[in-house]
Image (cartoon, rainbow, N blue to C red):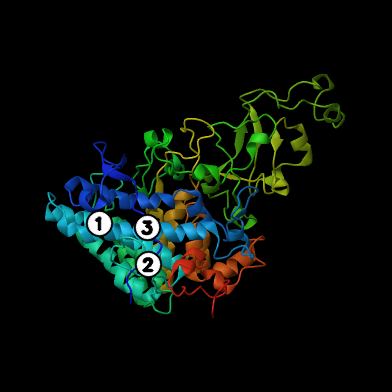
Amino acid sequence: MNNKWIIIIVLLSGIFSTSCEDYLEEDLISGVSAGTYYTTASGFEAAVAATYAETKSFYGWERGFTMTVFGTDLHTNGRGGSHKMINFYDGAFSPAQGFVRDTWRDFYRGINQANAVINRSENVNGVSEAMKTARIAEVRFLRALFYFNLVRFFGDVHLSLEETVGVEIEANRTPAGQIYSEAIIPDLEFAISNLPDAQNDYGRVSKPAAEFLLAKVMMTRAYQSYGQGNADAQEAERLMGNVINNYNFNLLPDFANLWDINNERNSEIIFSIQNNKNQVDEGLDTRGHSGHLYFLMEYDILPGMARDTENGRPWIRFRPTDFLLGLWDRDMDARYDKTYKHAWISNTESSIPEWTAEDANQGYVAPNLVGTKKYSIGDTAVFIPGPGKDELWTEDRIGRTPYLVITNSQYDERWYPTLNKWIDPTRPNRQHPPGQRDHPLMRLADAYLIRAEARIMLGDQEGAAEDINSIRRRGAWPGMESAIEIAAGEATLDFLLDERGRELVGEGHRWFDLARTGKLVERVRAHNPEGRNNIQDYHIFRPIPLEQIDRTSGGYQQNCGYIGADC
């Protein structure tokens, strides 16, 4: 097998180094040769940090959200955006699709960066062997993450553990099972053996992060024909047990505190992708977290409203499905109320509506108020009651209410409940796309839910219910902790997927969850009105990018079902 591929173009020009602020901070390195610079102590550290930097092109960015949110049971398309074919599963979702191409390209670039660090580490001077081993463990974790994503998206892909320098035109497809056994799992086992329980530099990979990722790897492989079924599930359960029990992670008492932008380094975060506010605000880093753009409805053209920094810049990409909005029992479960925005406060006077003669004729307002403003700046301008509350808003009540009330009968591609997990009011101005938020790739609630999934596969519904209830109790309104619990018999795979939707919505897990469990086609057909008519069994994988096929000597095999496939 030729252990090289073509789609590696360049190493990063902007890379990271450790700062005195105890987290990974960007540092521009230019005018140096990677071949010589990487063999110095500072160059080695910069090369390691450059591998971390490759995560930022996917996590917290439009491409990553699109590849993991669209085409699922929880989100369909809003009005904006040009990548709707990923949600439609129509003929435009082809090997030429840009986000698919760029996902492939960037993960392989990250892999090659990792390979460069590992391969060149032997010649590094001025770094102790212990430190070198620890840094290599970090890089091997990242390489495993990149390969894990590629395998989950594309199935069989090319495997290389050697650095590519220059242009290569040969590539082969390595079976996914082989990539798990020869790359992903050994890399993570090495990381577990050589990483500390906690890092001094916030944002570096730790041992529990490696255990977490390996548990998810094993749980994913457990469903595959080349996996080991229950044995993989048992290992996933063991590893997540370590993460849950053996470190200092704790579920936050209040779910809302997870999304407080001033509380990102909290006890629930196991590993997150870092962003630096100063560099994002100043434009030195154009790949800050931009999740605040995509889940917003088009509030800024509604009466009494104008676009501002506090409410965000709406790109109107991802709209919740009716199925998603029906997942929460809001009488017991507080998570919908702490996940979605309900009220928009008027910030512009020019478009505040006036009471009309028709309003007075209907008895909604006294005649002497006709022609007066319905409210003032600082008052509520728009309100969305949300699921389970719409029936409280009768036509008469809406007519008497001075502000605009949007109920489910009015939801469309422009106006719908808005996710507030990623809203970033700290951006320097209302137009600035990237924000400062970190992206929580791994948090403790997910560890509980993956362990519950493993226990369901192993037939331990009681244990699964215990894990699920740990999450549900935390998400309950005060006094409803017991009422929200489920019985062991309710701990099924479908219930678990619903619970993952309630807890992890918008965090970039959903397509992976459905693909892993074999529920993608079933659930899209049941719950995604835009995707249901076109999705087919072969959509469990994304198409191999046309760029890879065209630039590979002798071509490159396409995934079955897509244009150019020979299946």
Query: Measured from the top left, where is residue 459 in percent x and y?
Result: 42, 74
Q: Is residue 528 left or right of residue 474?
A: right
Q: Crowding near pointer 2: few (<14 within 10 Å), some, many (20+)?
A: many
- Camera sees residue 270: no
Residue tagged 1? 117
- Camera sees residue 327: yes
Of helix, strand and loop, which one carries label 2?
A: loop
Residue tagged 2? 5
Q: Is residue 94 left or right of residue 157?
A: right
Residue 291 is labelled as none
Nearer the observer, 105 or 335? 105
Kind of residue at badge 3:
Arg
* Image quadrant where one finds the C terminus: bottom right
Kind of residue at badge 1:
Val
Measured Cα–Cα span from mark 1 to mark 3? 13 Å
| Residue drawn where x is 80% and y is 21% of the image | 371
Q: Nearer the viewer, mark 2 or mark 1?
A: 2
Query: Measured from the top left, where is residue 516 in percent x and y?
Result: 46, 68
Among all residues in the image, which is located at the extreme top? 368
Nearer the observer, 268 or 477? 268
| Residue drawn where x is 55% and y is 69% of the image | 539
Of helix, strand and loop, which one carries label 1?
A: helix
As drawn, 307 above or below 142: above
Residue tagged 3? 109
Q: Nearer the viewer, mark 3 or mark 2?
A: 2
| Residue drawn where x is 59% and y is 66% of the image | 523
As drawn, 393 above or below 530: above
Q: Quick check: marks 1 and 3 in contact, CB under 8 Å?
A: no
Kind of residue at badge 2:
Trp
Query: Measured from the top left, where is residue 514 in percent x and y?
Result: 51, 65
